[in-house]
Image (spheres, helix red, strand yellow):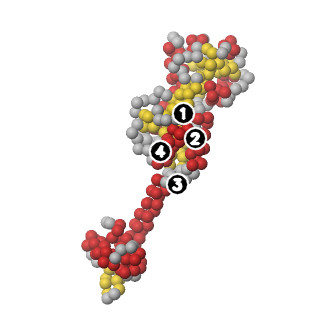
Amino acid sequence: MDFRTLRAFVEVVRQGGFSQAAKTVFATQSTVSKAVKQLEDEIGTPLLDRIGHRSVLTPVGEVVYRRGVKLLADRDDLLAELDEIRGLKRGVLKLGLPPVGSATLFAPLFAIYRRRYPGIEVRLTEHGSDELEASLRAGEIDFAGMLLPTAEEFEWQEVGGEPLVALLPAAHPLGTRDSLAMSDLRETPLILFDSGFTLHRIILDAARRAGFEPDVVAQSSQIDFMVQLVAAGLGVAFLPRLIAEQRRTPAVAQVLLDEPGTEWVMAMVWRRGAFLSEAAKAWLALVREVHGRPA
């Protein structure tokens, strides 16, 4: 069914005649008459009973008019909503962010985005890298904050990089050093992020490259809890330098980890070739605006 013919018919009924309807739809009376006849031919029965100069709705016409008014209103609402989405007055942005580094790297971006596009709903989820990657692959989120390197199926834009810092109990013999290598921690128990975090694998791989299997005494997704475990003398934990600086405490020494392949590099990641909504395109444009050209 053509919305043009339906609009003409509805206006004939609303305006009480063909000539008045023609003025409303900015067409000639002949054009409106042909449109109504076309609609009647498509439905297969008269919609208007023409009595002299008057037109009265037939029973079928009453149904078509009642339904047609709603269809046209829904169409107008649909077009208005699409215009709002294209104009970034409405829409949804789905972001997956890691617990480590989000407050520092992504909160400022989020604040700018909300100021520019207050009508966009931002849905945030927080997980480790493995769950974020699975959600991204399944199309459940538009972007994920993930550590590099990442799989070939994804595109990415780097947003920040930091060396790792070893957090040791203040009394630890290595606590006064300027830097240390992974091999220096051969005899020291480790406190790691949960296995779903890329930092977990980074530290395990570094230890194995140094020729030992580490003694992992605790795993957690809570940074503050891990820092407290270090302060209690349980072992050594690892954080990106900018995150470690925010959690300085006299009970914990911070020593730069001088180990190839352990730099913490965070990126905004999305599926290669994926459809990006207008809201998602605006977020990516902001990330690139703040953090440089496309990777």
In the rendered structure, which disc, 3 or 1, sits on the residue that comes first in sequence? 3
Please report the residue visible at 39 percent of the width from the left and 39 percent of the height from the top: 273
Residue 109's mark? 2
Residue bearing the label numbered 3: 89
Q: Is residue 181 visible?
A: yes
- Label 4, label 2: how many angstroms apart (C-alpha)? 14 Å
Q: Amino acid at mark 3?
A: Lys
- For the residues bearing labels 1 and 4, Cβ distance under 8 angstroms: no
Q: Are marks 1 and 2 in contact (CB under 8 Å)?
A: yes
User: How many dots with numbers?
Assistant: 4
Circles 3 and 4, Cβ within 8 Å, touching? The answer is no
Q: Which residue is mark 1?
A: 159
Q: Residue at x 61, y 35 (%)?
A: 104
Which percent across, then down, holds residue 291? 54, 35
Q: Does 277 appear above or below 254?
A: below
Asked if labels 1 and 3 touch by Cβ distance under 8 angstroms, the answer is no
Residue visible at 54% across and 33% down in the picture: 159
Q: Earlier in the sequence, mark 3 or mark 4?
A: 3
- Residue furthest out toward the right: 250
Name the residue type under label 4: Lys
